[in-house]
Image (tube, grey):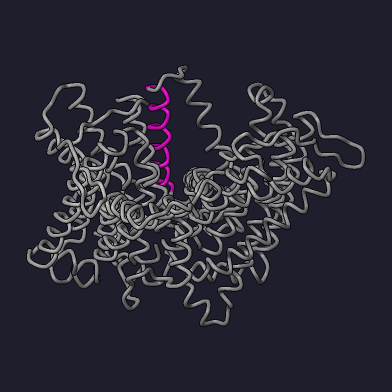
Amino acid sequence: MASNLSLELIWQFCVYGLNTGAVYALVALGFVIVYQITGFVNFAQGEFVMLGAMLTAWPTSSLKWQIWYATPFAIIVTVFIGLLLERFCIRPAEKRNANAMTVVVITLGAGIAIKGVALSLWGPEPYSLAVFNKGSFKIFGAVILWQNLWQLGATALVGGLFLFFFTRTLIGRAMRACSINRYAARLMGISPRFMSSVAFGLAAAIGAVGGIVIAPTAGGASWDMGTRLGLLGFVAAVLGGWSYGGAVAGGFLLGVMEQLAIGVTDRNWSRFQDAFAFILLLLVLLWRPGGLFARKARETSRAGL
Amino acid sequence: MHIAKWRAGAFVIFLAIVPFLPWANEHRDELIIIGLFAILAVGLTLVMGYAGQLVLSQAAFYGLGAYTSAVLTVNLKWPPLLALPIGMVVAGLIAWAAARLLFRLQGAALALASLGFGIVVYTILGQWDEITRGQQSLTNIPKLEILGFVFKGDLEYYYLVWAVVLLVMLLSFNIINSRVGRAFRALRGSEIAASALGVNTRAYKIQVFVLAGTFAGLAGGLYAHFRGVLSPPTFGWPVSIEVVVMVAVGGVASIWGAPFGAAAVLLITPLLRELFRGTSAAASGIENILYGLALVVIMIFLPQGLLTGAGSWWSYLWNKIRGGRKVGGSGFRSAAADGVVAEAAPLRASDEMAQPRKD
């Protein structure tokens, strides 16, 4: 334990944690929506994050685009790639009744290919992305960058839109029906195929938003940034028990615990920091195998992973 | 069993002459690495293909075996022949402890928790400098010596490693053709049904996981005494995923597929490198693209892996040539090599319920 640890410092680490946690939450939501609708874990989710960040950082720094039209451009292109992934990788496998492990390898392969595209197009060096608003302010002594507010705001906005989408719109309700029972939903005239396209499109959009807001404070956008963020988003999704609210809570929890663990430990322990998130995950799963916010076990469409 | 014996004999002869073939005689250390990964993949095939559990922690046990054996020989000056089995035992014991905790979980949570376990082990191996010398890498690991015979050259080591691969495969064949193996297959078909029939699913899952961990520990020890140098990234979590890819490419429920999957995955990169001849970012990006696309295409069109898939095409063609009727429906699903479960069985009974359509 570091001796000069004040309450103020802990509060500062909590604030840092909430910021990174906001992005983990966004990535986790992308995992959850695909899993809920299709029953598959999309290992390429992290690459959507990378694409969002890269497609904003590259045109703004190389083509001198303005951020306000680079951002929608990045989101639209990422959504398009998400739809392509669903159409040409997931759907053919589904048609052949592929099992969940096969789909895991397919999404892994697609993720590697997307990374390869990014590496050959943009090279190994990271592209920096300027913060949207410069400067910072203080809340109870903790420094908050304006960029951090963008991160928190993006998560709040996406969360709100999700709530609206899934409870108030026809297509959102159809998706929920689909995630409860594909077969019954089909009998009611809902097309699970279309819903799975929508799920991948939404997951790509959310991932892209996450990438765009984190890039300025994470040292820019680089071709391999998706791996780590994807992994931590996956952890947050599992922590939350694969529900939308749980994923958000899991993301924040993961971010705060990670920052606190790094903050309060000295060099002797902090060198093991890469393992902290996973030790937390293992402890939580041993305590509650279904995740922190798991409701009663329920058969989802293809829940065998 | 005729065909099986014939095939095994052909495989052994093939292995014996491979190191003298034109390209291979200059790449013997790659052949050794393929053998080590074949051991990892055979273990994971038992866990994934037969017990039906997706775990992503093979690299951790590979690393534990390697580091245990290396630390014992370097720091405590034990003879390698004694340290190697200790490494296996340590990997197996830790696998047992991990399995007792991990197999409370299922599906995606199990996959991620095992990956997390692998990351924790990797971080400890990499950062615990006092023992493993972490980032500076552990050097001067002695060569393996059996009864005064030192395995110095690549050729001797190649034969040693592949002999171990054959032993591990033989052991695995014996297991899956025994009562335990039938329990595994029941487990894969449907865990609920298996446990209803009196199979203690948890105990079997733990046993097969420990076996796979022990195999991995053995491979790790062999690696340590082959390379003479250990550095942590050799055992990072991407390696675990690579082993899963090998198993999937070789055929998830095929022990024969494991060495082929290992060879296919490990040879594709040098092959692509020969094709593109370049170390620029663009070239390695294109390598990644082709590797990823190859995985996607193989998994979509040959979901039972290259070997089983090729086998079923072959038997389909053979039947065409002889004018016989087609075996099975599409040619994809007709493979029936002995000892190989060929159907793409769904992971759970509910899978079929949820997907009755074919439109």
Depth check: A47 or A82 in front? A47
- Screen quadrant of the C terminus of chain A: bottom left
The answer to which quarter of the image holds residue B224 is: top right
The answer to whether B94 is drawn above or below residue A60 in the figure is: below
- At 37% from the left and 26% from the top, the residue drawn is A124
Apparent side of residue A13 relative to residue A209 in the rendered image (left or right): right
Q: Which residues are magenta?
A: B282-302
- Can you give x and y, in whole percent of width and height, for residue B12 in the image? 73, 41
- At 57% from the left and 52% from the top, the residue drawn is B121
- At 31% from the left and 49% from the top, the residue drawn is A16
Depth check: B193 or B215 in front? B215
Apparent side of residue B350 relative to residue B122 in the rendered image (left or right): left
- Can you give x and y, in whole percent of width and height, for residue A75 in the image? 17, 41
Residue positioned most to the top: B277
The answer to which quarter of the image holds residue B183 is: bottom right
Can see residue B319? no
Residue positioned most to the right: B148
Can see residue B45? yes
